Image (cartoon, helix red, strand yellow):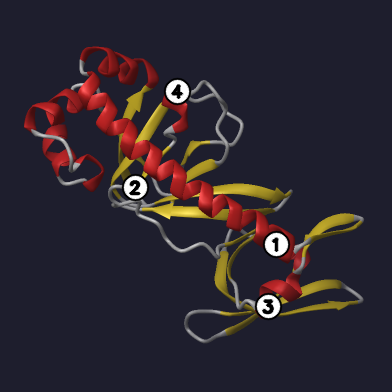
Amino acid sequence: MDIKKSLKDLSVFSSLNDDEMQAVADICKTRTIAANELVFEYGAQGDDLFIVLKGCIKIYTQITENVNKTLITLREGGLFGELAVISEDYRSASAMALENTELISITRDNFEKLLEDNPAVGKKILNVFIRIIANRLKNTTELYKQAVDWGLSISGILELNYSQLINQRSQISIDLNSGKNVSGILLKADKNDTGLELLLQTEKEKLVMIPYGAISAISFDQVKTDTEQE
């Protein structure tokens, strides 16, 4: 793969000239991720950032034992894991490929070498990181507000405030114990003698009732897709 040519197609590096682009290409590696494969997990030690060349990456965090909250989805040009090259902190979220995905990666050591050898190039890239991080901080503030709005109640186990999700017509994705997945808009959550049941309307306008005991994981997303292209 011609990494330099691939970088030219990404708006993240649009401010770089030809020589500067080559300097960045020299420290990049490529990686292919299969659909549903983890790139990294929350809490893991990381030392590299990633840029999506092709495909789709979901960045998410776990709210309860079986409920995940999607923070952002990234396609071509999307940058993630950038804090790993700025600090030695742990991953603050998990990243998973939603389809077969091609990534470019840059390690912390290689980025520091770029800063030392080509400070002008490093400064341009750092400015891009700062803009992206600033935008994500705004989103994080909104996510905290949403977390309070949704609420988490304790009744033996933690469970979502389903009434809030229904009122917001949230799009949710449910993984079943059978291995199947059902996605749609949550219309109703009924409690009966056998437990909780969720009623979903799928994209094909089909109504599906799912008993809570059949659910292995739930994810929901109310943050707009962000390709980070500026």
The reply to whether residue 217 is in sight is: no
First in sequence: mark 2 vs mark 4: 4
Point out residue 134 in the picture as x, y percentages from the top left corner. 45, 45
User: What is the C-alpha distance between the residues marked 3 and 2?
Assistant: 30 Å
Residue 201 against residue 131 in the figure, above or below: below
The quadrant where residue 125 appears: top left
Q: Label 1 belongs to which residue?
A: 215
Q: Amino acid at mark 3?
A: Ile
Mark 1 surroundings: few (<14), some (14-19) or many (≥20) residues within 10 A: some
Distance (Cα) linking label 1 and label 2: 31 Å
- Report, in whole angstroms, how far the alpha carbon at label 2 lies from the one at label 4: 18 Å
How crowded pointer 2 is (Cα within 10 Å; few <14, some 14-19, many 20+) is rated as many
Position of the N terminus, as image quadrant, is: top left
Q: Are marks 3 and 2 in contact (CB under 8 Å)?
A: no
**Residue 47, numbered circle:** 4
Residue situated in front as seen by the camera: 110 or 202? 110
Amino acid marked by disc 1: Ile
Q: Vertically, is 64 above or below 207?
A: above
Q: Nearer the viewer, mark 1 or mark 2?
A: 2
Q: Earlier in the sequence, mark 1 or mark 2?
A: 2
Q: Is residue 23 left or right of residue 62?
A: left
| Residue 78 numbered tag | 2
C-alpha separation, residue under disc 4 versus residue under disc 3: 40 Å
Amino acid type shown at disc 2: Gly
Residue 148 numbered mark, or none: none
